[in-house]
Image (cartoon, rainbow, N blue to C red):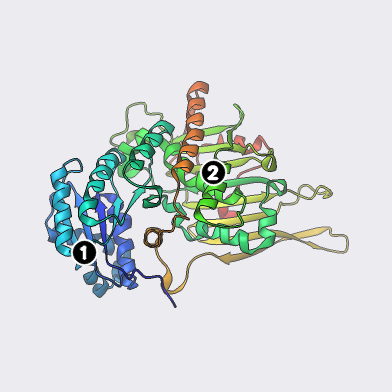
Amino acid sequence: MNLQKVDKPFHFLIFGASGDLAKLKLFPALYELAFQKRFRGAYTITGFARSAMSQNDFHRLITESIRKKYGKKTNAAALRELLAHCQYQQGQYDHPRDFKALGEALRRKHHEKIETLAYLATPPSVFKSIVEHLAGLRAVLGHKMKIILEKPFGEDEKSATELFHFISQYFSEEQVYLLDHYLGKTPVQSILPLRTSNTVLNVLLQGKQIANIQINALEEVGVGDRIGYFESVGILKDMIQSHLLQMLSLITMSIPIQQTPKAIKREKMHILSALRYGDKDCAIVLGQYKSYAKEKGVRPGSRTPTFAALRTHIDLAEWYEVPIYLRTGKRLNHRHAYIVVEFKKPAFNRDQALAANQLVIELAPEENIQIHLLDARGNRMQTHREVVSAESLACTGDDCLPEHGRLILDVFRSDHTFFVSFEEIIASWQFIDRVVRRITKDKIKVHPYADYSQGPDAQNALTACDGFQWYDADHL
């Protein structure tokens, strides 16, 4: 198998190297890349953070992170190989002298000017300071520098636009990679290839054929140690503004003839900029799991939603009157992420009680695609049974990578296909800002719901407005 490899030397900088994102996602992803021998040239991985740590402490942190993820499957030789390339630099994100020391440490490792990838695994509050000081390092490291930022990109349209203008002063659009880890999931990356490779899917995934679309990201876990962040954003800004709207755009966008990253982003923008908030009485249901109020760091009387179900439409002729339901929540009775496309029933079908045809794309816990059809039995087609065709979308073999590993390789290839543009982000924020304003204006209630339940019962009224009901992926 011809695996994609990085043959050139590089620096990989991780800002926020002592934080949760680095420990939970980045170190395991880099280990997997090293284990698969994807890094063939000389390279250095440098962690930069405010925490006081020795090199041994940093290596211990990386080791614990990887063993927590892979357990007994951790390959000792691959881990040693990775650690041999890892170093730590303590510093403040707003101190020029600390960045100067960082540059000197990197120059000692590689005298020639090589490609540098800088991953900002930090709170957004320090993005601007890091970007500004990184720009100053290019005189030392060379101009082959790319920066990777992970959401959230701002907290509303205004702040996202300001971030865009600030970064644009220092780095070009081609040098900036805005990472939404859902776009690294194999089923999500499969949506466009499935549509372009299968005529029947591309014909069916058009508004005139579809009764409704449901996009779900349901979690068993609560907010955990992200209370400070979550209290300031809530579930709408944390999940819907990014992950769910990206999936919505991929499943509904028109397929460009030339599938370049710019063409794909243009078509996604066409969808995101046309999103319309629903009617006042059939627009949104918010909820909060009952134990949330007792968690440390939650403000007294907090109305921060941990559950949201949203009904929206795409304000384009081809999607006229097709409701799209977005649903996400925490501390629910199961973990499940999936998309259901329900197709219209034939107009001449007299038995409207029959189940509709569906296309189901499951992201978690399984990764597969299902097509649900009806098989008629009997001379007069008086009995029916459902026929389900399912195929795994999970990767197999030696080339499987976690989401961040796959996206990091895309950065080395300068491939922006599965990264988000600032234009998409701003369009998404424009929509979410309208929703938030309506929540305040209409004084939308936040329904309490039991921990490990299906969420607030009021969510069922949302789909019932159009004569539909939520699909439970456990029973599809």
Instruction: Tell which of 238 and 13 is nearer to you.
Output: 13
Q: Is residue 200 left or right of residue 139?
A: right
Circle count: 2
Up/down of 300 relative to 381, above or below: above
Mark before the other along the chain sequence, 1 or 2: 1
Q: Residue furthest bottom?
A: 1
Give x and y (percent) for residue 72: 29, 70
Classify the position of the N terminus by image quarter: bottom left
Residue 269 image label: 2
Residue sitting at x 29%, y 70%: 74
Report helix, strand or loop for mark 1.
Answer: loop
- Disc 2, SS: helix
In the rendered image, residue 396, in percent from the top left (x then y), is placed at: 47, 71
Residue at the right extreme, as displayed: 380
Q: Identify residue for label 1.
A: 112
Q: Is residue 248 visible?
A: no
Residue at mark 1 to residue at mark 2: CA–CA distance: 40 Å
Amino acid residing under circle 1: Glu
Q: What residue appears at the point 46 percent right and 58 percent down from the top-left corner?
A: 185
